[in-house]
Image (spheres, grey):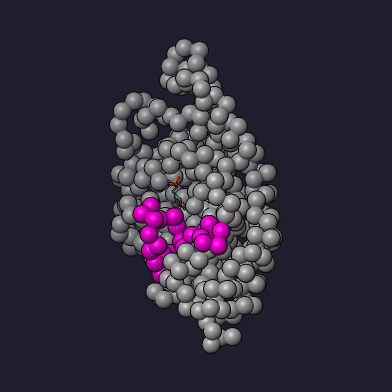
């Protein structure tokens, strides 16, 4: 294992010890929650305990169904493809698992990544079909927290329903599905200390949602396939301690402030995205003027830091992040940005070391600036 400093929690979080314990607890036991024998009953009990814990973590009342999926991506696909009677629209900075499925019907965001509520209202006014509005709770790349209560209020005026991709916010800040009166919400375990391979879609029971995969009758027929039980059990374990996890993440705000203050004092022309708005506590996206993201990432990698330029890219390439382009900053600025997404394990010494590595590259590329 590498000794490099991990600052890429939004790509995937280090697993919480409660999740590691739960994941391995029954790993050697053959458990299929659909079996009728004793092991099946144990599996069913584990599954339903995890479901109850997740319900509690996001305050999903009894009017909501909780369906486990293999990933946030799958849950997002299920929303857009499974609500066939609705025309879906979404913000311009949604994760690709929403954006690529929605296709047409994108709501602009402002320079901080906040969804344009006037445009949302206009789109809803101009449309006669039943509309599904999908707006993420918090953005993965720049951290912007969206005004979901207002999105729901506007949607209700026009009879539209609202889905929120809450994959990045869960465990980092509070999210209450019942209070927000969201119709559907996606969460994923691996972004807040749970394991890979467990996620969920939570939605109002009265919605005409249809499955997008076919097979067995698991998950109330909304999602066939034997559940990834050990991962779901570990997902439940982190839901159970979600208040502690949120509390731990809140400590990253101070580290982020030190990081951003230092970068601004070294390079006053740097741009820190979404600096003026409510953001995830751990997320910072900023530019190194004159230096391409890819060069920065290689430099950080060789100096023992793991971070990203924008979202984790499945191909391993560094693409110009579409989120930054949607903010209207232009190609050059967008292609000079990197993302630091901190974790409660990060220490002030990590930030100090990061600054040294950042400063070296910045000064070497901006000799005239010094
Ligand atoms: N939505 C957002 C905002 C994300 O950041 C991600 C992952 O990066 C996803 C959805 C997809 O989640 P998963 O990795 O569980 O498929």
Determine the residue positioned at 57% across, 70% down.
358
Residue 332: x percent and y percent?
41, 76
Counting from the top left corner in percent of width and height, residue 261 is at 65, 72
Q: Main secondary structure of the magenta part?
A: loop
* Left or right of residue 338: residue 244: right
Above or below, 90 relative to 276: above
> Of residues 113 and 122, which is closer to you in this image?
113
Is 218 inside the magenta-drawn segment? no
Q: Residue at x 36, y 62 (%)?
A: 106
Q: Answer whether residue 166 is visible to the viewer in this image.
A: no
Could you say which quadrant of the image residue 255 lies in?
bottom right
Residue 113 pos. (x, y %): 48, 66
Q: Is residue 330 left or right of residue 178?
A: left
Where residue 135 appears, as percent x and y from the top left, is 45, 55
Magenta-highlighted residues: 301-326
Is residue 143 rendered to the left or right of residue 70? right
Residues 33 and 345: in front is 345
278 above or below 291?
above
Magenta stretch: residue 308 in it? yes
Instruction: Out of 247 and 102, give the one closest to the viewer.
Output: 247
Please name the residue shown 40% across and 39% down the image: 207
The answer to whether residue 95 is seen in the rendering is: yes
Q: Which residue appears farthest toward the bottom when viewing the image? A: 368
Residue 212, picture quadrant: top left
Image position of 368 with respect to 122: above or below: below
């Amino acid at each position: 294992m590498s000794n490099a400093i991990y600052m890429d929690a939004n790509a995937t979080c280090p697993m919480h010890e409660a999740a590691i314990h739960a994941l391995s607890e029954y790993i050697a036991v053959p458990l299929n929650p659909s079996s009728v024998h004793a092991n099946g009953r144990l599996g069913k009990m584990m599954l339903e305990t995890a479901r109850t814990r997740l319900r509690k973590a996001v305050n999903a009342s009894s009017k909501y169904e909780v369906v486990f999926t293999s990933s946030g991506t799958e849950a997002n696909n299920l929303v857009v493809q499974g609500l066939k009677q609705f025309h879906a629209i979404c913000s311009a900075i949604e994760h690709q698992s929403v954006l690529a499925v929605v296709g047409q019907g994108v709501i602009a965001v402002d320079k901080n990544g906040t969804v344009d509520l006037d445009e949302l209202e206009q789109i809803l006014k101009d449309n006669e079909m039943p509309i599904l509005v999908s707006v993420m709770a918090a953005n993965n790349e720049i951290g912007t927290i969206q005004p979901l209560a207002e999105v729901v209020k506007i949607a209700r005026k026009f009879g539209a329903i609202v889905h929120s991709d809450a994959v990045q916010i869960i465990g980092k800040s509070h999210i209450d599905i019942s209070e927000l009166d969201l119709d559907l919400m996606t969460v994923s375990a691996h972004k807040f200390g749970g394991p890979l391979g467990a996620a969920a879609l939570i939605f109002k029971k009265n919605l005409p949602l249809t499955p997008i995969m076919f097979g067995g009758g698991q998950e109330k027929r909304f999602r066939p396939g034997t559940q990834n039980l050990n991962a779901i059990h570990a997902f439940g374990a982190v839901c159970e301690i979600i208040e502690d996890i949120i509390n731990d993440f809140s400590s990253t705000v101070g580290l982020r402030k030190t990081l951003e203050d230092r970068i601004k004092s070294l390079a006053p022309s740097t741009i820190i995205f979404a600096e003026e708005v409510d953001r995830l506590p751990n997320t910072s996206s900023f530019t190194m003027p004159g230096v391409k993201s890819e060069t920065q990432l290689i430099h950080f990698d060789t100096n023992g830091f793991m971070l990203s330029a924008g979202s984790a890219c499945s191909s391993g390439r560094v693409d110009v992040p579409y989120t930054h382009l949607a903010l209207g900053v232009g190609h050059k600025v967008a292609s000079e940005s990197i993302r630091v997404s901190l974790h409660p394990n990060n220490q002030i010494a990590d930030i100090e070391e990061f600054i040294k590595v950042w400063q070296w590259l910045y000064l070497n590329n901006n000799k005239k600036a010094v």
